[in-house]
Amino acid sequence: MRYSHTIGAHRHGFDDLRTLMARATPARSGDRLAGVAAATTQERVAAQMALADLPLSTFLHEAVVPYEDDAVTRLIIDTHDAAAFAPVSHLTVGDFRNWLLGDAADSATLAALAPGLTPEMVAAVSKLCRLQDLALIARKCRVVTRFRGTLGLPGRLATRLQPNHPTDDAAGIAASLLDGLLHGSGDAVIGINPATDNLPQVVRLLQMLDGVIARYAIPTQSCVLTHVTNTLQAIERGAPVDLVFQSIAGTEGANHGFGIDLALLAEAREAALSLRRGAVFDDGPIGDNVMYFETGQGSALSAGAHHGCDQQTLEARAYAVARHFKPLLVNTVVGFIGPEYLFDGKQILRAGLEDHFCGKLLGVPMGVDVCYTNHAEADADDMDALLTLLCAAGCNFIMGVPGADDIMLNYQSTSFHDALVMRQLMGLRVAPEFEAWLQRMGVFEAGEGSRLADALPLPFAAVLRQLEARS
């Protein structure tokens, strides 16, 4: 179907929904690299106007990636909840934006609506939103998940403690781990990116993290961010796996580039559930959100599997994959893929807010790695701006990296101190179970929320002496 909009004397035409979505997307380097971006600002505005007049129901009848060619499209269409969609089924994309900004779209209403929304719908409305719209709407979306703690509650900001080391040295990892815990980091997950995908080393790292968590009875979960097939093998070897990690994307071809398909993810989830390692909560159920996914705009283009779509729409489709497997955490590593896809701080900032917005509307527990690579036109001030907006928008979690500089992955992220600043600035706290543990251990002052204790907590003094002696 062809779409069009006239500005002045010029009529702008768009051959299909895929083209309309791409041309309506705010400028970014990845879409220009793919040859799908609007040629002029006028064309972009025309596409946005045409998109605003488009009925939301159009997305149920015209796919941006053909149904017969793509497993992700089939997942989106086949699992769509028509009853949940009914309250907004009569709206256009522009009307939907206005409705989302209104008081009727409260947290309970948006949670009920989420199964009725497709990723293309939320990507479309995001293209019409200003930054403040993206933040305000996302703030109203609450997605709560549980494993050993409760994440996503209002007024909370969790962190992934990321103690990476370029050689997986146990002492180096332990030092970063201790540093993070002493700054109140790690309630989302303690997650290591291993230097290699060597399976015995993956198992050793899992055992190390499990030993720390068990020794100090920390209400958190561990994850070694290796390929899902390695995690399955680790489970077969009896390794203490809490969360299964995998990078995912928004098309079948891009997921094949990661060496995965939907059936493999389902197998991994069932394997992790069979271990029953989550906590038993007071209301009865065991914590059963066992998956951790990471995404990033541009992954489908880099895999040559973008089908002529813009990168932000395909990123939103990755959240439909995530949603299907009920994860504990989903993290868009927004600036990590490089300036070929998000050129500078302005593009990274916009993309981070878009990703968080789209994921939350779809009912996904979104976090954001507020980050950039050293060859991008970005700096720490850009990241501070994005971090502050995300925390205002109710982001579930961010990264906690020693000094904000990951010495293994060689990129710039957020530090333990950044999380403390945001908690103080926004009145945010860590996950409730983790907060109680921090107070019991003497890391936080009792009854003071996120205030650090003045003295080194006694349970960790001996560990610090051991690390100092080894160094």
Image (spheres, rainbow, N blue to C red):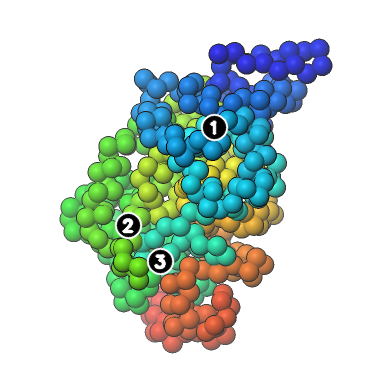
Residue 192 x, y percent position in the rendering: 39, 58
Disc 3 from disc 2: Cα separation: 11 Å
Residue pointed to by mark 3: 149
Q: Which mark, residue 261?
A: none
Residue 428 x, y percent position in the rendering: 59, 67
Q: Specify whether residue 29 is in view.
A: no
Q: Residue at x 50, y 72 (%)?
A: 184
Q: Is residue 258 left or right of residue 138?
A: left
Would you place residue 387 above or below residue 180 in this image? Answer: above
The kind of residue tagged 3 is Gly
Q: Residue at x 54, y 32 (%)?
A: 89
Quarter of the image that includes the C terminus? bottom left
Residue pointed to by mark 1: 89
Residue 376 x, y percent position in the rendering: 62, 42
The kind of residue tagged 2 is Asp
- Closer to the N terminus: mark 3 or mark 1? 1
Q: Specify whether residue 89 is in view.
A: yes
- Badge 3 density bin: few <14, some 14–19, many ≥20, Cα 10 Å: many
Q: Residue at x 37, y 30 (%)?
A: 78
Indicate the secondary structure of the residue bearing disc 1: loop
Residue 260 x, y percent position in the rendering: 32, 37
Quarter of the image that includes the N terminus? top right
Q: Nearer the viewer, residue 130 or 406?
A: 130
Indicate the secondary structure of the residue bearing disc 3: loop
Residue pointed to by mark 2: 288
Disc 3 from disc 1: Cα separation: 36 Å
